[in-house]
Image (tube, rainbow, N blue to C red):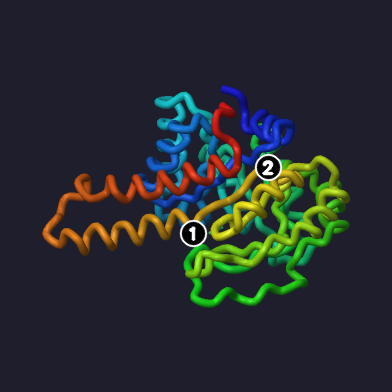
């Protein structure tokens, strides 16, 4: 099967983005795989440190491997927001396909130092590393009020350029106005396309990643992909579909005790969200 590197190159050339869908249990993972299968799309499964602890890192690796073998689909596993070299190393050693080192809270010099170390370790094992310059705030849940965005957290195009040159990282997560999580109204702040354009101008054809994909308008996502975004991360919309459907199903059927009878509706709801995103990212029929 072609590598993740191959699919990123293809995405850049053909103008689509690969969705990273975060999971912490088998039901959500199954829903993502079903959507990818229906639409013949490459997908990245993401687990943050806490999601990986809940699911189990070894379990995540073997589940993804099993689904890859069974479906023949290009499914890749990414450690999302790894916060230390130790955790990144652990993920690589256990069989993750790619890792995101999130040093965005560190001083830039320290961020560069650890990213470089991660890249060195990963490259020898043919694993890709995502770095981050700028800080994407929030957490993947619903907000009644959107937290105020801090302009200083936005990615500085020149810093991004230097970061790439110094770390030799494979792709870069940028903050162009998105945040983790979603307003309960369903509408999040607009993507700063002007800033994204400036970043693209500074870094050329480099692979860019958009975090905080939930609640972003479809128009902004399309424009961002045109401007070089090849990976979009989505978590909250999946969590909301999961939790709200489960609540609804159990409330409507308080005597039902059998998970395999009530969970299919939950899986279906997540599958639909993922299908909508895959079509939006235009990664359908790209395997
Ligand atoms: P959302 O929860 O806003 O979709 O963001 C997910 C994300 O960026 C994971 O890294």
Residue on which disc 2 sits? 230
Of all residues shown, which one is farthest toward the left?
255
User: Image check: 92 left or right of 109?
Assistant: left
Q: Would residue 81 be visible to someone looking at this image?
A: no
Q: What is the quadrant of residue 211 in the picture?
A: bottom right
**Image location (x, y in percent) of residue 134:** 74, 62
Q: Residue at x 40, y 26 (%)?
A: 70
Q: Say which quadrant the C terminus sits in.
A: top right
SS label for mark 2? strand
Q: Residue at x 62, y 64 (%)?
A: 179
Q: Quadrant of ligand 1?
A: bottom right
**Image location (x, y in percent) of residue 226:** 73, 44
Residue on which disc 1 sits? 236
Neighbor class of circle 1 (other Cα within 10 Å; few <14, some 14-19, many 20+) is many
Quote the CA–CA distance across marks 1 and 2: 20 Å
Numbered tag placed on residue 33 in the rendering: none
**Image location (x, y in percent) of residue 185:** 50, 69
Tally of numbered discs: 2
In this view, 242 is above or below 46 = below
Tag 2 or tag 1, which sits nearer the N-term? 2
**Image location (x, y in percent) of residue 214:** 55, 57
In this view, 213 is above or below 179 = above
Q: Is mark 1 within 8 Å of ligand 1?
A: yes
Q: Which residue is at the front of the view, 37 or 69?
A: 37
Q: What is the quadrant of residue 138 in the picture?
A: bottom right
SS label for mark 1? helix
Q: Would residue 62 be visible to someone looking at this image?
A: yes
Q: What is the quadrant of residue 245 in the picture?
A: bottom left
Q: Residue at x 49, y 76 (%)?
A: 144
User: Image check: 185 left or right of 258?
Assistant: right
Q: Residue at x 44, y 42 (%)?
A: 32
Neighbor class of circle 2 (other Cα within 10 Å; few <14, some 14-19, many 20+) is many
């Amino acid at each position: 099967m072609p590598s993740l590197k191959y699919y990123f190159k293809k995405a850049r050339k053909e103008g689509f983005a690969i969705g990273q869908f975060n999971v912490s249990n088998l039901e959500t993972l199954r829903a993502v795989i079903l959507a990818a299968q229906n639409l013949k799309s490459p997908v990245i499964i993401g687990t943050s440190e806490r999601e990986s602890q809940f699911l189990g890192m070894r379990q995540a690796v073997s589940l993804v491997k099993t689904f890859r073998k069974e479906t023949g689909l290009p499914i890749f596993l990414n450690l999302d927001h790894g916060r230390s070299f130790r955790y990144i190393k652990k993920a690589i050693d256990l069989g993750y396909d790619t890792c995101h080192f999130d040093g965005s809270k560190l001083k830039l010099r320290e961020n560069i130092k650890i990213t470089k170390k991660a890249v060195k370790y990963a490259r020898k094992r043919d694993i890709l590393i995502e770095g981050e310059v700028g800080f994407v705030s929030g957490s993947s849940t619903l907000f009644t009020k959107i937290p105020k965005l801090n302009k200083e957290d936005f990615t500085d195009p020149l810093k991004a350029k230097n970061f790439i040159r110094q770390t030799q990282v494979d792709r870069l997560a940028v903050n162009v106005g998105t945040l983790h999580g979603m307003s309960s109204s369903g509408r999040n702040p607009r993507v700063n396309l002007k800033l994204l354009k400036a970043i693209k101008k500074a870094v050329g054809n480099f692979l860019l990643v958009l975090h905080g994909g939930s609640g972003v308008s479809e128009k902004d996502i399309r424009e961002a992909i045109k401007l070089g975004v090849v990976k979009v991360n989505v978590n909250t919309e999946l969590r909301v579909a999961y939790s709200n459907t489960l609540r609804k199903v159990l409330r409507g059927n308080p005597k039902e005790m059998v998970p395999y009878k009530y969970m299919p509706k939950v899986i279906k709801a997540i599958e639909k969200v993922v299908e909508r995103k895959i079509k939006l990212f235009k990664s359908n029929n790209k395997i």
